[in-house]
Image (tube, helix red, strand yellow):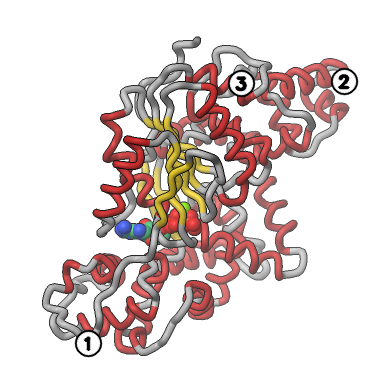
């Protein structure tokens, strides 16, 4: 059994904004994690599963002497990459070339660690296989998963997350400050309208608004983001309804440039900086660079984009639900998705070419501790990493050989060895793996 897994925690950096409520859920989650090896937080998009998982992990970390590892699957589409993403969270491999799930269980061994797997819903089977392999193949590791649907494993304990409770707007609200839904609205509203706070005069309207949003945290945040433009009374009377309707409304209130930026930025899973936003979203025709910068600021104001200051600089991120909404919009526009992904590929190529990419990876390793991106290279040699990158750019072996001035057979050999080391079966899986780690 190897001893190379890092001891430090791999929890993501500090939480973005104020955390409210969820005391009972935190308590329930701690109890479940104490008695069960697999706990899944379930609930609809935007209800707060990820936030609660992070908070819970933070609360229980002392009971896991070998630390906490965090795997975010939001940006992955290929089930074959799930074990690799989990392996990346564990640190450098001891041995390579073995079936990923076996290798993973062996590396976890007897460690008492908590693996947090975020966003399982679109890869349920692969997540269930991963989880089963760890539960059966290791004695002590525990798993905290978040998913809109249960994994469906025996022994899985569910913590169903409901929206935040909201008070009766016509009832006694003198204690309303204690209501987390209202506190959440006030917290996010103060970011948009400095000095905003709950008062005798506005509590009933905020309660009405939160109620009309069913206490769903994401919907409350989006509504707060519109406070400056729309005003509290109109928001409260707006009957915004379901999350979809709320998101639709947010979308309608965006400028044309903001909408396009939202749609295009949704190809950037895992967050991005301003330069990347510019390179991927601006096309010089419908959207110029400076318009993208303005749109990013507007989307932050509307709580569509989350802005995070990290050690490596400011980064932006779309929450899962809003990213999927953006992708739907992008796909509804003719040729948009391929053009946007094309610009993303060019951007990555450009970064690789200038060495900026390497610097950025180093910074990001330090910055956001996202375990997937902070992954070591799985025992790939520098040359193999280079070849993997070129495969991801869609180059054939002959082109790779020409680019690197090596024989075609040598290029073929590299590709075979890379696939073997990563336990992948073909080039498109390799391309997806490289892309997912960007
Ligand atoms: N208890 C809370 N305190 C403060 N903010 C919260 C809380 N719960 C959720 N939020 C905020 O609401 C938004 C949605 O929460 P989150 O991303 O955790 O939802 P989710 O259930 O993981 O959604 P998805 O299914 O799309 O991944 C986030 O911006 C989050 O910060
Ligand atoms: Mg989530």
Q: Label 1 crowding class (10 Å Cα cut-off): few <14, some 14-19, many 20+?
A: few
Work out how far the residue at label 3 is from the one at label 2, CA to CA, in angstroms. Answer: 33 Å
Looking at the image, which residue sits at the far front?
154
Q: Find residue 17 and report its horizontal and vertical position in percent.
A: 30, 55
Disc 1 target residue: 170
The residue indicated by pointer 3 is 102
Upstream in the sequence, badge 3 or badge 1? Answer: 3
Q: Left or right: 381 with respect to 230? A: right
Q: Quadrant of residue 36 in the image?
A: top left
* 122 vs 342, nearest the viewer: 122
Density class for disc 3 (Cα within 10 Å; few <14, some 14-19, many ≥20) is some
Q: Contact, CB < 8 Å: mark 3 with mark 1?
A: no
Q: Is mark 3 within 8 Å of ligand 2?
A: no
Camera sees residue 318: no
Please give the count of numbered marks on the rendered protein.
3
Q: CA distance from mark 1 to mark 2?
A: 76 Å
**Label 2 crowding class (10 Å Cα cut-off): few <14, some 14-19, many 20+?**
some
As helix, strand or loop, the secondary structure at mark 1 comes to loop
* First along the sequence among labels 3 and 2: 3
Q: Position of residue 40 (x, y in %)?
A: 45, 46
- In this figure, which residue is indicated by the disc labeled 2? 408
For the C terminus, the quadrant is: top right
Residue in the foreground of this view, choosing between 3 and 24: 24
- Nearest the viewer among 414 and 213 is 213
The image shows residue 376 at horizontal and vertical percentages of 53, 24
Q: Is residue 423 above or below residue 182?
A: above
In three-dimensional space, the C-alpha distance between marks 3 and 1, rounded to whole angstroms, equals 58 Å
Q: Depth-wise, is mark 1 or mark 2 nearer the camera?
A: 1
User: In front: mark 3 or mark 2?
Assistant: 3
> At x 30% / y 41%, what residue is drawn?
31
What residue is rendered at 68% in x and 68% in y? 285
């Amino acid at each position: 059994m190897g001893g190379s897994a890092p001891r430090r925690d791999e929890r993501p950096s500090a939480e973005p904004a104020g955390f409210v409520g969820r005391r009972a859920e935190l308590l329930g989650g701690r109890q479940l994690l104490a008695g069960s090896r697999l706990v899944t937080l379930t609930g609809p998009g935007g209800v707060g599963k990820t936030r609660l998982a992070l908070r819970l992990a933070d609360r229980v970390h002392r009971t896991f002497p070998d630390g906490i590892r965090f795997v975010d699957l939001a940006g992955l589409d290929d089930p074959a990459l799930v074990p690799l993403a989990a392996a990346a969270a564990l640190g450098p491999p001891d041995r390579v070339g073995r079936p990923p799930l076996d290798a993973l269980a062996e590396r976890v061994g007897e460690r008492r660690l908590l693996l947090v797997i975020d966003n399982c819903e679109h890869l349920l089977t692969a997540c269930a296989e991963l989880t089963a392999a760890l539960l059966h193949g290791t004695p002590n590791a525990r798993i905290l998963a978040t998913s809109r649907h249960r994994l469906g494993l025996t022994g899985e304990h569910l913590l169903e997350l409901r929206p935040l409770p909201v008070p009766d707007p016509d009832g006694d609200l003198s204690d309303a400050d204690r209501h987390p839904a209202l506190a959440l609205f006030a917290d996010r509203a103060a970011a948009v309208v400095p000095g905003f706070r709950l008062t005798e005069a506005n509590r009933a309207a905020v309660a009405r608004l939160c109620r009309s949003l069913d206490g769903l945290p994401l919907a409350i945040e989006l509504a707060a983001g519109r406070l400056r433009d729309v005003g509290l009374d109109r928001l409260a009377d707006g009957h915004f309804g379901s999350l979809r309707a709320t998101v639709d409304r947010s979308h309608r209130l965006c400028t044309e440039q903001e909408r396009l930026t939202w749609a295009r930025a949704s190809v950037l899973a895992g967050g991005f900086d301003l330069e990347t936003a510019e390179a991927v979203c601006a096309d010089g025709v419908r959207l110029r660079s400076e318009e993208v910068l303005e749109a990013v600021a507007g989307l932050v104001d509307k709580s569509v984009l989350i802005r995070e200051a990290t050690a490596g600089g400011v980064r932006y991120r779309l929450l899962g639900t809003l990213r999927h909404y953006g992708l739907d919009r992008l796909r509804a526009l003719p040729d948009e998705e391929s053009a946007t992904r094309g610009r993303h590929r060019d951007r990555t190529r450009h970064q690789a070419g200038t060495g900026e990419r390497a610097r950025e990876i180093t910074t990001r390793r330090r910055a956001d501790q996202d375990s997937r991106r902070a992954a070591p290279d799985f025992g790939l040699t520098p040359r193999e990493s280079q070849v993997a990158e070129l495969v991801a750019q869609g180059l054939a072996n002959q082109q790779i050989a020409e680019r690197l001035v090596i024989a075609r057979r040598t290029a073929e050999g590299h590709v075979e060895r890379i696939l073997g080391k990563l336990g992948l079966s073909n080039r498109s899986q390799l391309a997806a793996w490289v892309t997912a780690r960007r």
